[in-house]
Image (tube, rainbow, N blue to C red):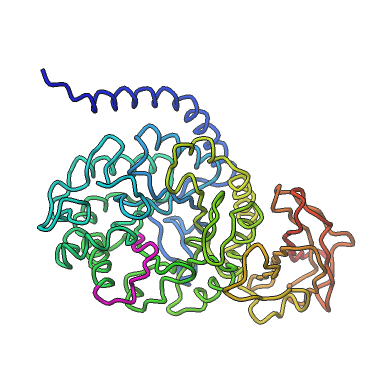
Amino acid sequence: MNIDWKSVVYGISAVISTLIVASTAAAAQSSAMSAQSSLSKPPAYPLRVSSNHRYLVDQNGTPFLIVGDTPQGLMGRLTEAEAERYFADREAHGFNTLGWIDVECAGRDYPTNTDATTPDGIRPFSGFVPGGTDFAHYDLSRPNDAYFVRLDHIVQLATNHHLLVFLDPMETVGWLPTLRNNGPKAAYAYGQYLGKRFRRFRNLMWVSGNDFNRWTVPEDDDLAQAVAKGIRSVAPNQLQTVELHVRTSSSFDDPRWVPLSNLNGTYTYSPTYIQMLHSYNQRPIAPTFLMEAHYDLEKVGEPTDYGTPLVLRKEEYWTMLSGGVGQFYGNAYTWSFKNEWPSHIDTPGVTQIGYWKSFFSSIRWQDLIPDQKRTVVTSGLGAYGNVDTRVSESEFATAARTRDGSTVVVYMPSVRTITVNMASLNGPAKVRWFDPSNGTYDDVSGLPIANHGSHQFTPPGQNHAGDGDWVLLLEASRTP
């Protein structure tokens, strides 16, 4: 009798993995239920764009703050049991989005997965076009059903944890050669295959591209768009977007993607507010969010920076006060799922994402308007910098207010005095300092502060982490 020892070994390892993760996943699920109930009910999918086109809402009209992790390499690295563990952990920490999962994993980002297989060796396609038998010559017209059943299961597991899922149908870092070898008609048909297969998931969206530096080459742009158009032709209600070139870009920088993109994703390694404001000011108006920046525990990008908790906090708060409606956090261990990933996912950076989410969930974040004309904070903002300024070195303060003047928020990366135009508020103000490193508040004395004239504010000193960044929250009170 011929024994498929590879399948036997995989089966045994999958059982062991299931036993190992069961107790951890159960505990994470319990924590997730507690965290979910303390903040809000699960979103009523599908999401749609709000009536003013600035943010996302669920079917009940509830604004949806994007709190995303980025498990790009999941399909090539995790078993279903491991994916369950990961999803439970992310839900427990307040994440509501997976942004994004690569449908297939091969190429530059996955150099050891030469055939884009699942951990147990299932290939995404069952044949090749003429010219070779590598992943670049996979025949897109011959998808392997077993592979896409696995992806079905993965998306369903995420659905069980109330997570919004972004799929990248054919990420362009590694798969442009495959698209070129197949041509636009096959790319379009492949998009239709994906759209038909996954349109039943109400919590699913699509993000094309990924370090898509070749979008300026019309032939390559056409190929990536062919996949997106194929999806749109059969799943018109699933929202889409695209990630363009490395360093700094916005989805709408390519006008040809605008008709296909419901969201405007920002990609930048520079101080986040620079590109976020560019995205916010682009037309047509669309929800804009931070799609990719410096990742936790990783030193990459241009300008280069290491993803320390402080660097991550700057990116997070700059995003929200520059017109953003959320962000995709990233982690060096969970985007690629290195072997050591289970011991590197519950980091200080993840904990402070929870503080960030709780802070903005406590106010009308969806109504914040960036203080671009500097009429709210009139002095003390610091140097604006440029795209060559490192995140770790920027001390620029960002500010935003609600149109009705009920709320003003200022993020200060360092301790100094700022001047606030109190007439920005519609009533006497309650004022608090929020420590983004531990989620606590300090009240400002002498409250309420009248809503006329100017007032100077100085943070209490170093925050709990020993850094200088603080958030100033001013809320108008109707009580005289």
Q: Position of residue 121 (x, y in %)?
A: 25, 37
Above or below: residue 285 compared with residue 327: below
Label total for image = 0
Left or right of 113, for residue 2: left
Quadrant in the picture for the C terminus: bottom right
Q: Is residue 209 visible?
A: yes
Above or below: residue 146 compared with residue 417: above
Residue found at the far right of this picture: 446
Left or right of 406, for residue 253: left
Q: Position of residue 124 (x, y in %)?
A: 22, 46
Quadrant in the picture for the N terminus: top left
Left or right of 452, for residue 125: left
Q: Quadrant of residue 221?
A: bottom left
Left or right of 286, for residue 201: left
Q: Position of residue 456 (x, y in %)?
A: 84, 71
User: In front here: 288 or 162?
Assistant: 288
User: In front here: 41 or 414?
Assistant: 414
Q: Quadrant of residue 360?
A: bottom right
Which residue occupies 18% across, 48% down? Answer: 125
Which residue occupies 46% across, 50% down? Answer: 43
As for residue 264 lying within the magenta part, the answer is no
Above or below: residue 375 compared with residue 31: below
Which residue occupies 53% across, 37% down? Answer: 32
Above or below: residue 156 compared with residue 461: above
Which residue occupies 53% across, 63% down? Answer: 325
Q: Is residue 203 visible?
A: no
As for residue 213 lying within the magenta part, the answer is yes
Span of residues in magenta: 207-219
Q: Position of residue 293 (x, y in %)?
A: 52, 61
